[in-house]
Image: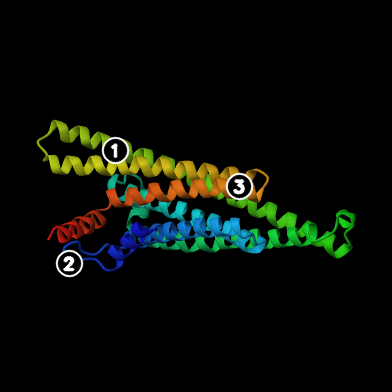
Amino acid sequence: FLVNIFLFVCMFCPQQRTGQLKQPLKVLLGTLVGCNITLQLCILFCSIITIFPVFVSYLFIIQLTYFTMRISLTSSFWLNVFYFCQIVPAQHSFFMCLKRNIRFFIYSALISDKVFFLFGFYVGITCGVIQDELFCKKNLNTYTQFNETQTTKIHTMQAVFLVDTWLQCCYLSLCLCVMLTSSCVTILYLQKHMKNMEESSFSSVRFKRQMRVTITCIIQTFLSFFCFVWMIVYELLPHYIYLYSYICGTVACLYSFGTTFNLCVGQTIFRSCVDEMYQKCLK
């Protein structure tokens, strides 16, 4: 948590020597850091609510955790697309257009993602509250006795939940496929470029930079793949909230830790801030 606060400060209050991040990279990295902070706060609140259980609060925190993970994953996906456009030479008219208008595509996608996932967040909260109201707050004799209004509410809830589930699943699957494709192409291009650098007389500093970019790209791809698969499984399987909350917390911890480590290692501005702070401590 403190590391992510430090990264946030480095981004928005950079030192003169580190310089400013350019857009849309600043927005993407800021979203990832903000999502990491939110995930860690959600895990903390989940631990507290486990000791002092309150259903509505617990449901809200779980849904907020999944909402944050979805936003973080799609931000990571668009960060991969951004690096793909920056690193791999465009050879098709579509990719040339994407590269020229990358800011517009990323900003539009981030706004659309938030609206889309906010709808899923609202559906999850609403369905959970209705389910608790209809099934958990009634005595055993009335479990199967519903009036016409309650039956309509149940059918509407099931229909909306089913539509939202398949929309979320299809969108996450599409993002996963595109992310894997763009990441693999980027990694293969970097490996080929590094091989050419070994055969040429490039400096070791530049070679190490390319190596670092390749490794961080592989790590982030693995992390995103792991979380994308979990989110798709979560959408498809029946929701046992108390069981899934523990799995969700574990996945969120691993993803948040891995992303934080990757940002610290892979981004020049963060490494420079750490180095500068270390030098000040030595003085």
Numbered disc in front, either 3 or 2: 3
Circle on res. 16: 2
Cα–Cα gap, marks 3 and 2 = 45 Å
Q: Amino acid at mark 1?
A: Tyr
Q: Amino acid at mark 3?
A: Tyr
Q: In this view of the protein, which residue sits in the foreground, 226 or 192?
A: 226
Q: Position of residue 38 (x, y in %)?
A: 46, 60
Q: Position of residue 204 (x, y in %)?
A: 13, 39
Q: In this view of the protein, which residue sits in the foreground, 228 or 99?
A: 228
Q: Amino acid at mark 2?
A: Gln
Number of residues whose C-alpha sits closer than 10 Å to that of mark 3, classed few (under 14), some (14–19) or many (20 or more) = some
Q: Secondary structure at mark 3?
A: helix
At a point 56% along the width and 45% down the height, the residue shown is 247
Cα–Cα gap, marks 1 and 2 = 33 Å
Q: Which residue is mark 3?
A: 244
At a point 45% along the width and 62% down the height, the residue shown is 108
Q: Check the image and name the residue furthest to the left.
A: 201
Q: Secondary structure at mark 1?
A: helix
Number of residues whose C-alpha sits closer than 10 Å to that of mark 1, classed few (under 14), some (14–19) or many (20 or more) = some
Are the residues flagged by discs 1 and 2 in contact, CB closer than 8 Å?
no
Q: Which residue is mark 1?
A: 189
> Where 111 sits versus 73, above or below?
below
Are the residues flagged by discs 1 and 3 in contact, CB closer than 8 Å?
no
